Amino acid sequence: MLYIPGQQGKMCDSLTRREILEVGGASMLGLALPALLEQQARADSKPGGSKPGWKKAKSVILIYLQGGPSHIDIWDPKPDAPENVRGLFKPIRTNVPGIWLSETMPLLAQQMDKATLIRSVSYTPNGLFNHTAAMYQMLTGEQADKVSPSGQLEPPSPSDYPNVGSHVSKFLPPEVAMLPFVMLPRPLQESNVIGKAGTAGFLGKAYDPYYLYPPGEDTDQKKMEKLKLDDLTLRAEVSQNRLERRAKLRTTIDSGMPELEKAVSSFALDSYYEKALGLILSGRAREAFDLTKEPDKVRDRYGRHTFGQSTLIARRLIQAGTRFVQVNWPSVANGDPQTTAWDTHAANFGPLKNLHCPKLDSALSALLEDLSQRGMLQDTLVLAVGEFGRSPRMGVSTSGNGNAPDGRDHWPYCYTAMIAGGGVPGGRVFGKSDATGSTPVENAVHPTDLLATVYHTLGIAPETIIYNHLNQPRELVKGKVVTGLF
């Protein structure tokens, strides 16, 4: 329920102060006072207009491929490498001369004029690493500091560094009554560590994403038809007229409760109250989640699977005014590669060819085509990336995991990200890997550089000073903007 906490006390229509300030009884986002108050901790962004790409994007869609897909078998084929490196897939031409993809991505190959491949993402892990530690770095820009012997982190903590989307929702709240940051269709997860790197951490729950995790198995074709949006809907017993009447009582509250007025005078309560109320009354968010509004041919184009329909929802959310949408690959990061996961320590090729790549291919290609046709790509930044790639050589252990002869282990030393829109020209390759896809030989890009670039395109200076849970000053992210992308 969205409310401003206060002392109990009856008002003119026998409602408590708490009840008066509830917004329609909607349990939206689990937010309390911070969600409605002015962002007092916001630091001033330094102007970055002299650098290419500054403030070219208004919103971001992050396609987060948790589990670590194989770069060689998808984005960066190596047909001339030894057999135990190049694998089973052949390269195919794209619609851009000189750019080749794996045969697993035929639809995306026809949309490469709209995107840039960064084939030189690279970092050296700090000690033991597995999915959670790598995801934490990729999505917060900070190194893991509490890694267990298995490579995992502790569960989410209020002292965690915030997800990139949480910072964006704080610095750039939506211009309309809309959810600022949405994450779907399942949590970030490795084994029993759920949600790490997917919260607002020390920024507070006010900046957590709106989590949309539909019920059902991730292989369920009807999963996205089971969306429950009760928290964005008025309770049956609370009419819109009554909700609007409650809103008008703000005048009474402001004049009759000077102690409350004094307490919130510096927080621009009016503006944030109106936005919260408007979100419920406008129905904008509920409309964005309603896939029945889309023609069947569009839904088919994205793919009638969880990932495809979630990617379509991302476009609808951005179109409705959301700033940041994170679409997580719908699988536990270290799940079963035979069903849903990218974690192909064994049987790398069958699952990629028959299950995972067709889903990725349909959804990504449709998103680029759709955004372009709607004129949205120019100010929507799209970034598709995982926490690492897979080992170039098959059957070797690089992270302490066992690997079958036809499997690939974790490989953070060189992998690929795809970026499009937001001022990034399409039809290009940035950076270069060596002959086996093992290490960058040109323009290495650290994950923190990717985050710095995301912030930069939105007009948020990466060097902006924030304060952590200990009130210590920190840069927003210790990365360099990849200006060569623009």
Image (cartoon, rainbow, N blue to C red):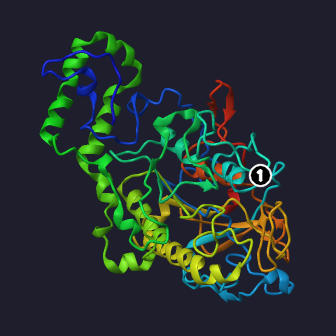
Which residue is the site of mark 1? 150
Q: Secondary structure at mark 1?
A: loop
Q: With respect to residue 3, does 182 lie above or below?
A: below
Does 125 sit left or right of 201 as displayed? right
Quarter of the figure with the C terminus: bottom right
Residue 54, position as x, y percentages in the image: 58, 50
Q: Nearer the viewer, residue 43 or 231?
A: 231
The residue at the point 66 percent across, 62 percent down is 334
Q: Nearer the viewer, residue 114 or 126?
A: 126
Residue 47, position as x, y percentages in the image: 59, 40
Badge 1: residue crowd in 10 Å (few <14, some 14–19, many ≥20): few
User: Quarter of the image holding residue 391?
Assistant: bottom right
The residue at the point 43 percent across, 64 percent down is 216
Residue 60, position as x, y percentages in the image: 51, 56
Does 319 sit left or right of 472 as displayed? left
The residue at the point 81 percent across, 52 percent down is 125
Q: With respect to residue 85, does 457 lie above or below?
A: above
Residue 484 appears in the figure: yes
Quarter of the figure with the N terminus: top left
